[in-house]
Structures are given as structure tokens and as C-alpha cells.
Image (cartoon, rainbow, N blue to C red):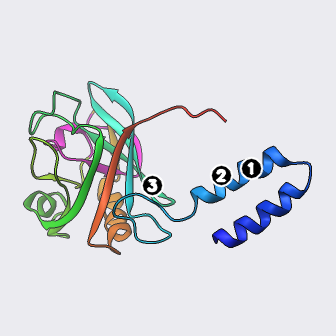
Amino acid sequence: MHPALATYIGCRLMAGWHLALARAWLRAAAAWGRCRRRGCYGWRCAVVELERWAYTPVGVFGTLRIGRWSCYTVERPWAGNRPNVSCIPEGVYPLRMRRSGVVTRSTGGEYQEGWEVCDVPGRTFIMLHPANTMDDLEGCIGPGEDIGVVRGKWSVTHSRAAFRELMDQLDERDEWTLDIRPFRVQWP
């Protein structure tokens, strides 16, 4: 929603007796406005959010969001940020496109390039690529359309289809910002 329209509607609401409701509405409208995060260009934020909500011995599961689109993710369990065996630490990282053999192999040659999570302390070559279980990953992030069981293990399902959609969602920019954080309960 355009800020001028939000302000007009907010002022009209404040003229009535719903002052608390109007203030809450204005806060929500302001949140939809321009993003002030580094790397954001205009009204649609250039931030990809990964919210981790299950830290288990069979994988770390989360939800990846770009605007209104989302998919599930699987990663290896936390093992002190050791290369090839651990998920990466929570934080904010740049995402950049690069040529990758693991993307070529995991997509059956459909894609030769993929998105790399850059500037992770002590780690390199962390890619977003199709993977169903944590066993398919070496420190990377695997997208999926749903959560289920594959080969007797908890996993994300339809990973190639989710990866295709993810690539379409990320196609509009050369660089994105990945914000990885734990799930936090928000009370109304």
C-alpha cells in the first residue's frame, strides 16, 4: 500500500474512537512500506528469509520466504559450523549466482548455475540446491514443497519442483540478502 494512502486512511481512523486500532493499523502499513535493510531496492525487499523451526538429529527444518512465496528447507544439524557436516550459523549473508557442479548434478543438468550463500565465517561453496534429506547435503540448503518421509527419514518433498520455483522467484535480481533466524513466537 502506498504510504500516502496509508497515512490518509490512518488519519481518518484516528478521527474516530478507534485510536488504538488506528495506531496498530498504521504500524502494520508502515511495515509494508520501503524496507530499510541493506540491499533493498524499493517496495519489494531483496531479502530472502529463512526461519528455522525444527533443530533435530535428522536435520534442521525451516521455511524460506521471498515476499508471499514460501517453501520448506532441510539442512544438516548444527555441528559447530564445521564444513560439509553442519548447517551454517544464523545471521545475514549475501546470496550470489555462480556456476556449480552440485547444482548441475542435483538438477539432472537442468541448471548449471545456482545461488551461493557467501561470507559465512570459515565456510565456502554453500549452495541452495535440490535435496530431500540431510544425507543429500554437505552443508548446503535444500528446498522442498512439503515435509514428509523419504527413504525412511524426515525430509522435504518435491525438491526439484521447489528449486525450479525458487530459481524463478530469485531471477529478478543479481544479488539477494539471506536472513537466517530461529522461529520466534509472536504474541498479538
Residue 153 appears in the rendering: no
Reading the image, the residue beneath label 1 is 23
Assess disc 1: are there few (<14), some (14-19) or many (≥20) residues with their C-alpha within 10 Å of its C-alpha.
Answer: some
The first of marks 3 and 2 along the sequence is 2
What residue do we see at 15% from left, 60% from top? Answer: 103
Question: Is residue 23 shown left or right of residue 111?
Answer: right
Q: Tell me the tag on residue 115.
A: none
Q: Secondary structure at mark 2?
A: helix
The kind of residue tagged 1 is Arg
Residue 21 position within the rendered picture, expressed as x and y whole percent measured from the top left: 79, 47
The image shows residue 78 at horizontal and vertical percentages of 22, 29
Q: Distance of mark 1 from mark 2, alpha carbons?
A: 6 Å
Q: Quadrant of the N terminus?
A: bottom right
Residue 169 in the figure: left or right of residue 80: right
Quarter of the picture holding the C terminus: top right
Which residue, given by chain and number where applicable, does mark 3 sit on? Answer: 70
At x 35%, y 75%, the residue is 172
Residue 140 highlighted magenta (yes or no): yes
Q: The magenta stretch spans which residues?
A: 132-151
- Secondary-structure class at tag 1: helix
In this rendered view, identify the residue nearer to me: 46 or 101: 46
Q: Are marks 1 and 2 in contact (CB under 8 Å)?
A: yes
Badge nearest the viewer, 1 or 3: 1
Q: Is residue 97 above or below residue 55?
A: below
Residue bearing the label numbered 2 = 27
In magenta segment, residue 84: no
Earlier sequence position, callout 1 versus callout 3: 1
